[in-house]
Image: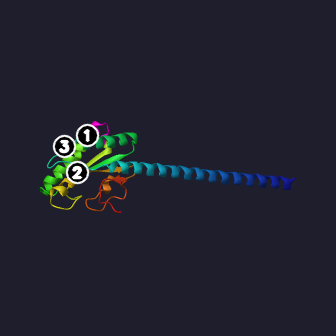
Amino acid sequence: MKTLAAALAQILLAAALIHSSACSTTKAAHKAKVDDGAAKERAALVKQLNALIAQGPLHFETDTDILTDESQILLQKVAAQMHRVSKVSVVVGGHCDERGDTEYNLALGERRAHAAKDYLLKLGIPKERIIDISLGEEQPLAEGHGEVAWAQNRRDEFTFLLPGDSPSALKIGTEMAAGMVATTSFSQPQ
């Protein structure tokens, strides 16, 4: 009788171990499937954001922070995407051409970034999801000393961030933050 009881206990223990192992395998497979789904969702979102920013940057006339009709249309598309995906934030970087001194260009870049931010606020994007910064003339898109280069350098660029991405990683110069999801900046590493 003791051997039968011991054999029965061993069978029950083996069944419990098999069940436990199967549950953990199922849980691991489920977690992998969820992680894979999140990665695919993020990749799809990044692709959408990249397509959106490929339509930018916003350009400005000389010595002004007034948004053109074309700029407003692009900002409406940015706002629509941000309404659709509420976890996305945006950093707007205002840029200038080389004319004017550093202090003036930083102030003008700030006004340009702020103009885009104000327009996004009017379109219902919460202010905590918009960061505006001025880069003045520090990151020219086009080298040169003529109207063609200056026109390309008078711009606002966008960098989209997802939760966990850090806007504090933004740097002036050619080094761009590793956490950036998508950016209109043309100086990001390849």
Q: Amino acid at mark 3?
A: Ile
Expressed as whole percent of the image width and height from the top left, the position of residue 57 reads 27, 50
In the displayed image of the protein, which residue is found farthest to the front?
A: 148
Q: Which residues are magenta?
A: 118-127
The residue identified by callout 3 is 66
Label count reads 3
The residue identified by callout 1 is 119
The residue identified by callout 2 is 155
Q: Secondary structure at mark 1?
A: helix
**Upstream in sequence: badge 3 or badge 2:** 3
Q: Secondary structure at mark 2?
A: strand
Expressed as whole percent of the image width and height from the top left, the position of residue 83 reads 37, 39
Q: Secondary structure at mark 3?
A: loop
- Decide if residue 92 is in sight here: yes
Expressed as whole percent of the image width and height from the top left, the position of residue 182 reads 36, 53
Report the side of 46 relative to 156 (left or right): right
Report the side of 107 relative to 32 (left or right): left
Q: CA distance from mark 3 to mark 1?
A: 11 Å
Q: CA distance from mark 2 to mark 1?
A: 15 Å
**Upstream in sequence: badge 2 or badge 1:** 1
> Pointer 3: residues within 10 angstroms few (<14), some, or many (20+)?
some
Q: Is the magenta region chiefly helix, strand or loop?
A: helix
